Each structure stands twice: as C-alpha cells, then as structure tokens.
Amino acid sequence: MSDSTVTEPEGRENVAVPRPVTGEAARGPLGRLRGPRRPRLWFEILLIAVSYWTYSLIRNAVPEQRGAALRNADWIWRVEHGAGIAVEQSVNHAVNSVTWLIVGMNYYYATLHFVITLGVLVWLYRWHPGRYAATRLVLFATTGVALVGYYLFPLAPPRLMRGGHFVDTVMVHHTWGSMASGDLKHMSNQYAAMPSMHIGWSLWCGLTVFALASMPWVRVLALLYPALTLLVIVATANHFWLDAVGGVLCLAFGLGAARVWYGALPHALPRRVPTPAPGPAAAAAQAPSP
C-alpha cells in the first residue's frame, strides 16, 4: 500500500512517513550495547590485553592430565586411521626433510598466529569501525568456548605421542618461539591441543578479510592463510587434522553468538557507525529561529 496523505486547507499534500526511533535514549542501555558503536582505542587495547591474559591464565590453569591426554591422542589417531585421513606423520616427515621449509614453518607457527590476528583487529578498527565490535565478539566467543574444550578433552599433540614416531621440529632444528617445546614448555599447557586456535583464529582472519576486502588478490590471500596454517600445524606435529575441525566448530559458535547478539553477521552491519538522531532538546536547539 502507498503512504497515506493528509490534505491541508491550502491544498498542499504532506506525505506521512513513519519515523523510526533511533535516538540513543530511546534505545535504552541494552539497545546501545547491541548496536554498532565507535570503538575507543584505549579501551580496546586494555580489553584485548586483559582478555588474552585471562585466556592464557585459564588455559594454563587447566590440569594437564597427561595420562588422559595421551589416551585421547591414541584414540584420535585410531579414529583418523579408521577414516583414512591419518597422514600427519607422512606430512611431518616429508616437510622435516627440507630444512629451510620446516624452519620457516616453525617461525610461522610461533609468530603469525598473533601478528596477523592483531593486524586484522587494527584494520577493522581503522576502516570498519561499525563492524569492529561484532567481529571482535566472534573472536572472543571462539576463544572462550575453546577453553571448555581444553578442560573437557585434554589432548597431547602428535609430537608427544607414545610411539607415534613424530618429529618435534622445534627441538630438532633448535628454533625459538614455541610455547610447547624447549625452554618455554613449562609456561604453557602442552596438553591443550583440542581445539586448535591456530585454525580458529586464522579462519577468523581469513573469513573477515574475505568478506570485507574489496581487492580480489587480498581476498585470495585471506583464504590461503588458514589453508597454509592447517598445513603448518600438521607439518610441525603440533596438531591432528581433527584438532582443526574443533577450531572450525569453535568459530561457528562465535559467529552464532554475534548473530544472536547483533541480529546479523558482522559483514552485514554498516561499515561506519551511524550518527544517532538528535533528541528533542538538541533538535529544538538546532532549529532555525523564526
């Protein structure tokens, strides 16, 4: 149906258009939290720092449960053999035979997990402020639910399996940076391999950039990043294939959480934070004098 019209005595017709309520006061506290807001730099830096510290604290506080973790690793290995996908050992040995390649993968595993993720957050903050909070929620929810997996299903990585004959590439090639090998192994829970947050975070990065970037070559690189990360975590014997499946499921949970909270997936939200409509007092102050 068309819009209703009102005819005034002078003969003019005014279209009666319904006015959406968009003012901050009308939305209420919950509405303001669920709507796009301009992120504040100091708050985001503090939030990310505190969140990662809390995540590391909880992850490392989960009992290592070495016996259960090794039994679960044996079970995963049997399941993958039954499914015909237990090729991690072959990939590990093949890549380890090329020294420059495996050394590069060791450094990739130790650094890009953090560098790329922080880079995407900065990019979102600068160029997509309206989508930043929702996309950050996806990352936080993905990471948060992973902690449940670490607690309920302790899992040894392939390199720590009994009789698995995997190569611990960090130890063999004396590269730095792994929190699970060498001198740093006591700073991290080595039996928290399921789910793989290297996959959860890299897929978050890849899908975010793919959905929002405009240049085709950037979108292609965005999809290649999680694919290459999958190869790296297997080649370095830090994860099974099924650990990657766990990371994907965690990301699906994170996307669902953002969809429920914001009513849309992050890429569907406005790129810029919409300017709120002025309240009655502000509108009256801005009105021209007669």
Image (spheres, rainbow, N blue to C red):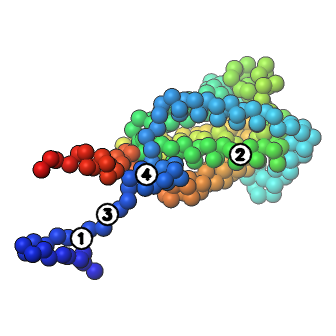
Label 2 belongs to which residue?
146
Q: Are marks 2 and 1 in contact (CB under 8 Å)?
A: no
Neighbourhood count class around disc 2 (C-alpha, 10 Å): few under 14, some 14–19, many 20 upward? many
The residue positioned 57% from the left and 58% from the top of the image is 260
Q: Are marks 1 and 3 in contact (CB under 8 Å)?
A: no
Q: Nearer the viewer, mark 1 or mark 4?
A: 4
**124 shown above or below 53:** below
The answer for how far apart the CA atoms under marks 2 and 1 are is 52 Å
**Foreground of the two, 58 or 112:** 58
Q: Secondary structure at mark 3?
A: loop
The quarter of the displayed image where residue 179 is located = top right
User: What is the residue that sits farthest to the right in this orientation?
Assistant: 67
Task: Give amino acid for label 1.
Answer: Ala
Neighbourhood count class around disc 3 (C-alpha, 10 Å): few under 14, some 14–19, many 20 upward? few
Question: Mark 2 or 3 closer to N-term?
Answer: 3
Label 1 belongs to which residue?
16
Label 3 belongs to which residue?
19
Q: Are marks 2 and 4 in contact (CB under 8 Å)?
A: no
The answer for how far apart the CA atoms under marks 2 and 3 are is 44 Å
Question: Mark 4 or 3 closer to N-term?
Answer: 3
Task: Give amino acid for label 4.
Answer: Ala
User: What is the residue that sits farthest to the bottom in this orientation?
Assistant: 1
Q: Secondary structure at mark 1?
A: loop
Q: Nearer the viewer, mark 2 or mark 1?
A: 1
Task: Give amino acid for label 2.
Answer: Ala
Question: Mark 2 or 4 closer to N-term?
Answer: 4
The residue positioned 53% from the left and 53% from the top of the image is 30
The residue positioned 53% from the left and 32% from the top of the image is 43
The residue positioned 20% from the left and 76% from the top of the image is 5
Question: Mark 1 or 4 closer to N-term?
Answer: 1
The answer for how far apart the CA atoms under marks 1 and 3 are is 9 Å
Could you tell me residue 248's position as x and y percent? Answer: 64, 51
